[in-house]
Amino acid sequence: MRRALRLLPLPLSIAICLPAMADDKPVNWGLCPATDVLPVFDDAPKADKAAAATRDQQDTDIEGDQLFGTSTVPQYQGNVALKRGDQFLGTDHLSFDTESGNYIAEGNVRYQDSSIRMVAKRAEGNQEADTHKISDIQYQLVDRRGNGGAESVDLQGAVGQMHRSTYTTCDPSQPVWKLSAPQIEVDNDEGFGTARNAVLRIGKVPVLWAPYFKFPIDDRRQTGLLYPQLGLSGRNGFDYAQPIYFNLAPNYDDTLTPRYMSKRGLMLDNEFRYLYDGGRGTLLTAYLPNDKLRDKDRGRVEFEGYHNLNANWQARANIAWVSDERYTEDFSSKLLGVTASNLQSQVGIYGTGENWTGGLMADYWQLTDYTLTESSLPYARQPRAFFNWDKPLLPWLETGVYAEAVHFTHDDINVKFGPEQEYERTGQVVQQFNGSRLDVKPYVSLPFSGPSWYVTPTMAWRYTAYDLDQGLANDVRRQALIDAGVDPATATPDQLRGNTSPSRSMPVASLDAGMFFDRETTIGGKSFLHTLEPRLFYLRTPYRDQSELPVFDTRDFTFSWGQLFRDSRYTGADRQNDANQLTMALSTRFIDQTTGRERFSGSIGQILYFDDSRVTLPGQQAQVEQGKSAWIADANYAVNDRWTLGATYQWDPKYKREDLASLRARYLMSNDGVVNLTYRYRINAAAPVTATKEERTLLEQVDLSFLYPISPRWSLVGRYYYSLEDKKPLEIIGGVQWDSCCLAVRAIARRYVRNREGELNNSFQIEFVLKGLSSIGQNTDRTLRRAILGYYRDDLYLVPPSNTGADRDDYDPNQIP
């Protein structure tokens, strides 16, 4: 009799498989009634998932009010109950033929386990042949809130058919949406189901019909159609993408997505993924023959993957290529896609150990800004070898070395006309020369510290040497003459001939010291731990003439709090500034003793330059003069559990001007609402001192974003991102959200900068979220998450979503970056 219990869970696997896709954000079931669609059966055992794992090894207990019949055909009458592990079968009457294997259960048939609850009028079948028929079923999925019914279910071993079945996560009294099919076939051995003539209705309106719908019923992947994506935009027109999934093998698969854009044509997008014990990878390709807006073929290729060579070494590759310089702009509606001017491809072998890291790699840059030439591209490193080693020898002695050897190459520059001629190439080519660089920096550090103080003197020696093409050496010498005020036209040939093997060798000494003071204090009746943390950082580096050194990958650091404590103000090895300077900084914090939360933190710092710093980059006339740097201040204040304020400010006392200002405010509502307000201002450090404020301003922006719940069901979302410098919006979003127990609808309108000329584009997005099933329409959820920090409350406590990557566009799922 034990195997008779197998018949009832099978039909429910059909319903379980229907919600095959879910939202990234956890589903909000807060508007659902607390009552069960099917009440818990009082005479059933406790739904214990631990017992479900061992049910097959347990005996079946059968009981009822009356037992009659014969020994070969026992019949149970009245409150019949079969129990095994977490399973329960109840019925009014049960008969079982032990010789033939036939059984009949009729009258108030009930079944329950840890995941399913169901009722039926009748169940009959043959235990030996493993054939079963169940009539008039109503079911509830306990964990997923799914429920529905079926007219009948026929089972033959692992294969079953459900007739006139339905599925929804709504309350049966208010089925806002419902999925129904005249026939669903399930093959448990193969792990898939097939629905024929399936219809999805929202209310009473059919919104989706599938004559043949194949879906997985377990974790095994199946070849078939994925949910389509529909869109409408000003650049692409009507936009329809239909992903087709191919389950090629257990460790690799492929998704082919034909995409029709009425204004552009038919694009084929493909994603191939593979996985094995030693690594994984993804290959993305796209091809659009004869783009009607650009009148040419267009496409892209992206690959990302790695392979573990052993416990210490890994090979990695990130390769990207696009067909033309306007591809990223045309197929990305993010501001990042508009402003990105290049793509980087990189391959290499990287290693790491207890005290070392190292690697051998190469990279290449492709231009993706049609307004620029190859002169804006960084030098490619082909190849680059690096090695870092550091090890504490004693508690107060640490030593290490940084070493790098690079060969730099650069594409020749194809000169372009100006904007009046749409940046077409003139045909003129400027040859670019190459070179190599060796940079070695050993150091010794003495980290002394106590419970409330630390002092860390560090001594390093930096040696940098080059091997340059003669043409590059001549270009460096020519620029050096110009910076020195010498006209190259009047220079002698010897003066114009550059050094192909320049080098630089110099010591770098620093002393980093700090103290920690703390005290307990009371403010407004609350107990706080108040800290005071002064810090001094002294840097001493002698001057070396570096005018003969080329600049491959070096630029100024943006002046910020971190710059106060670096031993160089340049990012690369081509320049090491001379320095005789002292940084003085002070930080303070107020920590709530009850909650441990930091209520206030503030920092202020400034650099004192005892001597002029004479090292500059080519083309820069200004040097860092003796005196004081700009003041840098930063503060964050958690007013309460809802309000958070922050500010960053830089004031230059020499020119009596603000170099940077950033103000931030955030308000968290009790009902998951959020309001963000930000102001940003930064000057252009390269602007002359005599420039006006308007000429000095690099950017000045305000950014307001919000999620405002009007009621448990309705909420407003929006963003207003405006450039005060350009006197035009960068992005405007306005939308409304409606939520119910089992359905959510989001509709947003968006206006945003779409190209480098600052032209604006309009779009409208709408999405229907069928909770527990999937979503129909565009992915507005990702749009809002990226535009409104705190739209997902967890984003406030984790790393914010990345704005880069090879995924489909965050703002418009019908766009491909």
Image (spheres, helix red, strand yellow):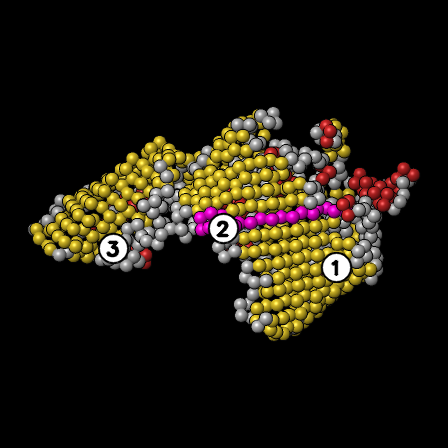
The residue sitting at 28% across, 51% down in the picture is: 38
The residue sitting at 63% across, 33% down in the picture is: 326
Amino acid type of the residue tagged 1 in the rendering: Trp
Mark 1–mark 3 Cα distance, whole angstroms, equals 71 Å
Q: Is residue 189 magenta?
A: no
Q: Which residues are magenta?
A: 696-715
Q: Is 779 in front, or is 395?
A: 779
- The picture places residue 507, in percent across and down from the top left corner, at 78, 60
Amino acid type of the residue tagged 2 in the rendering: Pro
The numbered mark at residue 41 is 3
Classify 597 as above or below 19: below
Q: Secondary structure at mark 3?
A: loop
**Residue found at the very far left of the displayed protein:** 70
Classify 572 as above or below 131: below
The numbered mark at residue 709 is 2
Tell me which corner region of the image, top left, top right, bottom left or bottom right, holds residue 520.
Answer: bottom right
**Residue found at the very far front of the displayed protein:** 710
Left or right: 210 with respect to 402? left
Q: Secondary structure at mark 1?
A: strand
The residue sitting at 60% across, 45% down in the picture is: 720
Disc 1 residue crowd, few under 14, some 14–19, many 20+, Cα 10 Å: some
Q: Secondary structure at mark 2?
A: strand
Mark 1–mark 2 Cα distance, whole angstroms, equals 41 Å
> Magenta residues: mostly which secondary structure?
strand
- The picture places residue 388, in percent across and down from the top left corner, at 66, 56
Disc 2 residue crowd, few under 14, some 14–19, many 20+, Cα 10 Å: many
Mark 3–mark 2 Cα distance, whole angstroms, equals 39 Å
